[in-house]
Image (cartoon, helix red, strand yellow):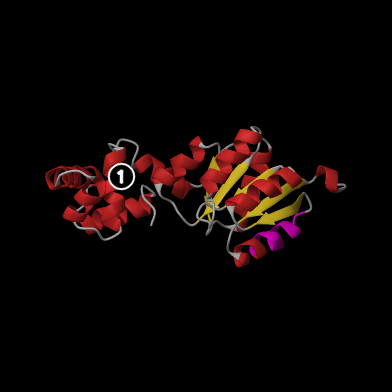
Amino acid sequence: MSGAGSRIRILAVDDHPLVCQGIAGLIETQPDMVLVGQASNGREAIQQFRTHRPDITLMDLQMPEMNGVDALIAIRNEFPDARVIVLTTYAGDVQILRALKAGAQAYLLKNTLHKELLDTIRAVHAGKKRLSAEVSYEVAEHTADEALTPAEILVLQLIAAGNANKQIADQLSITEETVKSRVKSILSKLDANDRTHAAMIGLKRGIIEL
């Protein structure tokens, strides 16, 4: 590859310095890539994107101040042709679909082999979309599942925060009977044994966040 002009320009967004260092070290070894900027939260990501206009953005999802999906939506609104690869530790299907709907071209887990990450950067730069095998499986596994309603997600969020039915009823200004019926529906849809199990499934799949 000749000159910086023909290299794939990359922005890395992650709030873990070690991850950023790892990505920087990896990209440094590639003759066809260059790291043009780094950010540690969604707000910084938007500023860095405006400054550098990278070809590819590697975006973590769980970050302080502004999460990756919100940053992705903001960047794509301003720069519709932005190419973003989500690189995260979370394989929850709801989280994955949210990122893909927001315009991510690829979704990889952080335990991805270096070669897969480099191949994905090149593929997305060439206009392709990529999901790692593990991520594809997560999405496929729950395709036929009945989704929770916004009201049920709210109840699940409060369950995960440690609230009893009565507390949930008080907070949402609904009856305890309504809470019970929503909990029953949540358990059935998530195929959960009890409230704690439902909260764990909700967190794992990215339906709720703590």
Whole-percent x, y for residue 156 in the image:
28, 50
The residue that label 1 is drawn on is 153
Q: Can you name the residue that lies furthest to the bottom here?
A: 18
- Helix, strand or loop at mark 1: helix
Q: Is residue 162 visible?
A: yes
Residue at image point 64% right, 52% down:
44
Residue 113, by quadrant, is: bottom right
Quadrant holding the C terminus: bottom left
Q: Position of residue 34 (x, y in %)?
A: 76, 52
> For the residue marked with disc 1, what is the amino acid?
Ile
54 horizontally vs 175: left or right = right
Report the span colored magenta.
Answer: 22-30
Residue, x 15% and y 44% (percent of image)? 175
Q: Nearer the viewer, residue 157 or 140?
A: 157
The correct choice, above or below, for 172 with respect to 77 in the image is: below
107 displayed left or right of 1:
left
- Residue 205 point in image, percent of width and height: 37, 50
Q: Measured along the vertical axis of the image, is residue 154 above or below residue 26?
A: above
Residue 166 vs residue 48: left or right? left
Image coordinates of residue 19 in percent, x first then y, are 60, 63
Q: State the predominant SS element of the stretch in magenta.
A: helix
Q: Residues within 10 Å of mark 1 (few under 14, many from 20)?
A: some
At x 38%, y 40%, the residue is 140
